[in-house]
Image: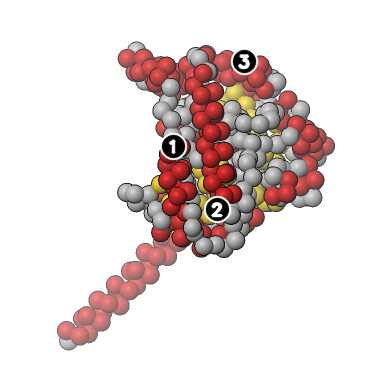
Amino acid sequence: MKIICAGEFNFFYIRSVIKIDMVILMKTSKRVKSISLSGIRKMFELVGEDSINLGLGEPDFDTPHHIRNAAVEALKESFTHYTVNKGILELREAISNKLECENNVEADPESIIVTVGASEALFMCMQAIVDSGDEVLVPDPGFVSYDACVKLSGGVSVPVKLEEENEFRMTPENVLENITDKTKAIVLNSPSNPTGAVMKKEDIKGVAEIADDHDLVLISDEIYEKIIYEGKHYSPGSFCENSVTINGFSKAYAMTGFRIGYVAANPELTEEMLKVHQYNTACASSISQKAALQALKGPQDSVGEMVAEFKRRRNLIVKRLNDMGVECSAPHGAFYVFPKIENSQEFVSESLKRDVVVVHGDAFGKYGSENVRFSYATSYEEIEEAMDRLENINF
Ligand SMILES: Cc1ncc(COP(=O)(O)O)c(C=O)c1O
């Protein structure tokens, strides 16, 4: 009798487990299931006490004093309530002025939305543009969010293979060969994460012309705009009517934790994006908005100093990698190098064993699978120590 009861119990238990499983499966969307958490985050779980983290995607510098003080002042003045959805007018005016003076992009303050980092800007831009089945061209290797944001909007992301022999710059030819009658938008990212590539003026202009000719939206992620060592940054918005400019304060002003960025687009698209923004976040943090205003209006010396230090570190890491037999060119922007390494998976595992965290290139798309991303957003001394640890690695 007892055994039968146990059996019955098991039977009901199993049924209820199956039922729960079914309920869970029914409740999760295919769209969300189709994406996974970033491979970079997985690497961070492996960071130990003695690890040197060359996987970081954020400046290791402190946010400049005058910017932090603006946040403190905002708190003292109880500037702690919702702002208008698009963000405070003063900040949007400052962004509009910056876009006009520095980027030659005309954007009325009403066509600008202040967002929770460039991340939110990317997300809501895709939501507002992409319909089910639409194709969006994304750089590959490229920043992890592009593919995910396209898929979360029900679209299909089409990888545009970036060639090492072109220093990973996206060229008009790369773009043209991937356009179909389903293409809706193109994502550009210069300087690039993970490659550090800086696109040339003629490439940006060429892609902008393709976007205009094919009536496509050009989404330009310019978050590393100020971290350039050689060459110059060009905004597609100065060449293309149908462009969206995405930028933020995380990298140039070491403000990752403030979660503040912006997007500028034509009035029609701005109003559509605003709906997504309103129902998603309502507005960016009021305190961060005041800090961002100070970042734009205050002294810019800290940006120059940070970029000079990044350049010193880039030169160090490039030299050390080349000295140990890893062929590595010097990218012109951002704070990453992305060399091709034979047996790249083994290299990453061996680096981890030696307490150095790097990110395997396949985290950035299928065309990054032979490469490894090293971030030099960590101190000069730590980079030296990391290179000492990797020196005699067999690959
Ligand atoms: C290319 C690129 N775009 C956007 C972002 C997101 O920036 P934010 O901190 O402003 O959300 C990152 C962050 O690493 C990035 O590398």
Camera-side residue of 64 and 182: 64
Of badges 2 and 3, the one in the foreground is: 2
Vertical arrangement, residue 239 with respect to residue 30, above or below = above
Specify few, some or many for label 3: CA neighbours under 10 Å numbering under 14, 14-19, or 20 or more.
some
Camera-side residue of 7 and 262: 262
Q: Position of residue 295 (x, y in %)?
A: 49, 19
Q: Residue under label 1, please give it.
A: 379
* Residue 105 visible in image: yes
Amino acid type, residue under disc 3 in the picture:
Asn
Q: Distance between the residues labelled 2 and 3?
A: 47 Å
Of the image marks 2 and 3, the number of the one nearer the N terminus = 3
Residue 97 circle label: 3
Question: Residue at 69% across / 30% down in the picture?
Answer: 231
Secondary structure at badge 2 equals loop
Q: Quadrant of residue 362?
A: bottom right
Of badges 1 and 2, the one in the foreground is: 2
Of the image marks 3 and 1, the number of the one nearer the N terminus = 3
Vertical arrangement, residue 73 with respect to residue 140, above or below = above
* Residue 128 visible in image: no
Amino acid type, residue under disc 2 in the picture:
Met
Q: Where is residue 341 in the image (x, y as percent from the top left)?
A: 59, 57
Q: In this view, does 280 lie to the left or right of 20?
A: right
Amino acid type, residue under disc 1 in the picture:
Ser
Which quarter of the image is occupied by the C terminus? bottom right
Q: Residue under label 2, please give it.
A: 324
Q: In which quarter of the image is residue 128?
A: top right
CB under 8 Å between discs 1 and 2 = no
Q: How far apart are marks 1 and 2 (CA)?
A: 20 Å
Q: Residue lying furthest right in this view?
A: 213
Question: Residue at 43% across / 22% down in the picture?
Answer: 64
Of badges 3 and 1, the one in the foreground is: 1
